[in-house]
Image (cartoon, coloured by chain):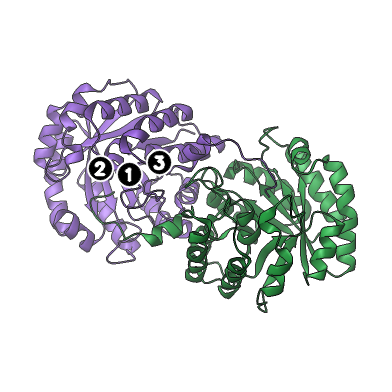
Chain colours: A purple, B green
Amino acid sequence: MFITVHEVGPRDGLQNEAAAVPTSDKVAFVDRLSGAGLSAIEVSAFVRPDRIPQLADAEDVFARITRRAGTRYAALVPNMNGLTRARAAGVQDVAIFAAASETFGRRNINQSIDESLVAYADVVAEARHQGCRVRGYLSTAFGCPFEGDVPVARVVGLTKRLFEMGVDEVAISDTIGVAHPGQVAAMLTTLVGEFTAKPLALHFHDTRGTALANVLRALDFGITTFDSSAGGLGGCPYAPGATGNLATEDLLYMLHGLGLDTGVDLAQVVSASRAIEPIIGHALPSRYVQATARTVPGGSRA
Amino acid sequence: MFITVHEVGPRDGLQNEAAAVPTSDKVAFVDRLSGAGLSAIEVSAFVRPDRIPQLADAEDVFARITRRAGTRYAALVPNMNGLTRARAAGVQDVAIFAAASETFGRRNINQSIDESLVAYADVVAEARHQGCRVRGYLSTAFGCPFEGDVPVARVVGLTKRLFEMGVDEVAISDTIGVAHPGQVAAMLTTLVGEFTAKPLALHFHDTRGTALANVLRALDFGITTFDSSAGGLGGCPYAPGATGNLATEDLLYMLHGLGLDTGVDLAQVVSASRAIEPIIGHALPSRYVQATARTVPGGSRA
């Protein structure tokens, strides 16, 4: 079976890194990732440069990457202006970003959930009109840093609204990395029953170490698209070694071990991560990347 | 359902840490772990002090810990001399250490697999005669750093010999952290069919990030005993942030999320790990421990 690994390192990863990354390094990073065979890469976001300076060069990055056949190059667009810029940069795959928590949404984009969805409806309609593929993120779906638990019924309702407004795929996102496999099973029993597995993607953060276990449980429900970030990039804004996004290498190691096809060369993703590591200035949190950096341990270990 | 978390931090963890840990700190560590409710703690090993200086104070540690009703305090014994020392220290739970790989066994204890099992048979018989509970580790069961893959048939055969010589429990151990859930399923289909799930324990290392996914799959096979190390202690002998043993906190977070009972207070295990962290001189690799050290991230994350 083919599993789509949706690489978010260049966007969600770099956005959460403190070091300013030169455009040429971003371009090389994206090209290494596509060269590794990744079929979906989120390259940047067309947001206000003063809001997220790290991604202010979105146009430049898109202009300079080498587009490989078989790879979709996506960008986050927060509004109609972002969509216009993305389209001018030749972007075919766009993503919008909705929250499942009122408080998180308010703090993040200063809108209520409903206000944001009303605004997004026009963006999605226009993107679809222009032939774009549209992904909708549903953040804090497994828990909110301010509100705590998020009811499954709310996630189902918002997913439904996103599909109704025309998004092709909804990425159910565990923004703060609290999800565990029991919660994933409960959530997917309802979501897959309602929408089937095909248009659903899962976006896990490995903050508490449960991301791969969550993927394993989601595979049991037929989910075939998972987000991850090369090296676990983006996980260390505050603490070295701490982790945010599930690392692409860790995900690939497990998927390939399960006999699943991704079309991706794991070693080449490691190379891409290793090349970006000195630029961001700290070790990447991916367990697999760390393991390949060491000599194999011997000695009396059980 | 009750899951036994077999805490190996004080032994397997500290043994692999570079910093010499004072006896009083080990005693406090074990007491904090038993205070957290852990029902099985591997405290030390009665090995030659010149071979593993970190554990040379095994007698002292056992003499000074406060024994809590409901906690089993175990020790590794490599031979009859070790058993004699352990028994003199009042140890009721002993463990022996066999390898599933000839090369690993030769390098580790300078014996063939068969030689080691012949020698262990006497140790196990004597331990059982004295009323001890005996655990047998089967290391490198999922892969060997020198030989690569280890055939399932060999693991089954060696597990059978360990049970035949009288061990109560066999800990199937992924010494180098290469196991993935597909391999766990293949292994357990055979092992559980042969021996039932009850006397089997699983010992995973999180070297490639798959440990919790492996536990999740093992739970599907009815396994009820898992090894882990507080904070992921023992994982960083060579690289900061790199990991060896599955962290107890990460395991507990997932097990409790799944609604499984362990009798352990997660916050108290975190406290035990935090107290040992400055003594070993580096941050512990547990994702959960790292997450609790940070402020909850907000901002525009999917």
Q: Say which chain tag 3 marks.
A: A
Q: In this view, does A101 lie above or below B64?
A: above
Q: Quadrant of residue A25?
A: top left
- Distance (Cα) linking label 2 and label 1: 7 Å
Q: In this view, does A98 lie above or below A83?
A: below
Locate residue B276 relative to residue A195 in the image: left or right.
Answer: right
Near-viewer residue (A225 or A78) = A78
| Disc 1 residue crowd, few under 14, some 14–19, many 20+, Cα 10 Å | many
Tell me the tag on residue A15. 2
Residue under pointer 1:
A234
Residue A64, percent across and down? 22, 22
Question: Do the CB atoms of the residues marked 2 and 1 lie less than 8 Å apart?
Answer: yes
Residue B257, percent across and down? 48, 64
Query: Residue sitting at 45 percent across and 27 percent down?
Result: A263
Q: Upstream in the sequence, badge 3 or badge 1? A: 1
Q: Which amino acid does label 2 sit on?
A: Gln
Labels 3 and 2 share a subunit? yes
Q: Tell which residue pokes out farthest to the bottom in this image.
A: B69
Residue under pointer 3:
A284
Residue B8, percent across and down? 63, 59
Near-viewer residue (A56 or B237) = B237
| Disc 3 residue crowd, few under 14, some 14–19, many 20+, Cα 10 Å | many
Q: What residue type is labelled 3?
A: Leu
Whether residue B217 can be seen here = yes
Give the secondary structure at mark 1: loop
| Disc 2 residue crowd, few under 14, some 14–19, many 20+, Cα 10 Å | many
Q: Upstream in the sequence, badge 2 or badge 1? A: 2
Q: Say which chain tag 2 marks.
A: A
Q: What residue type is labelled 1?
A: Gly
Whether residue B166 can be seen here = no
- Distance (Cα) linking label 3 and label 2: 15 Å
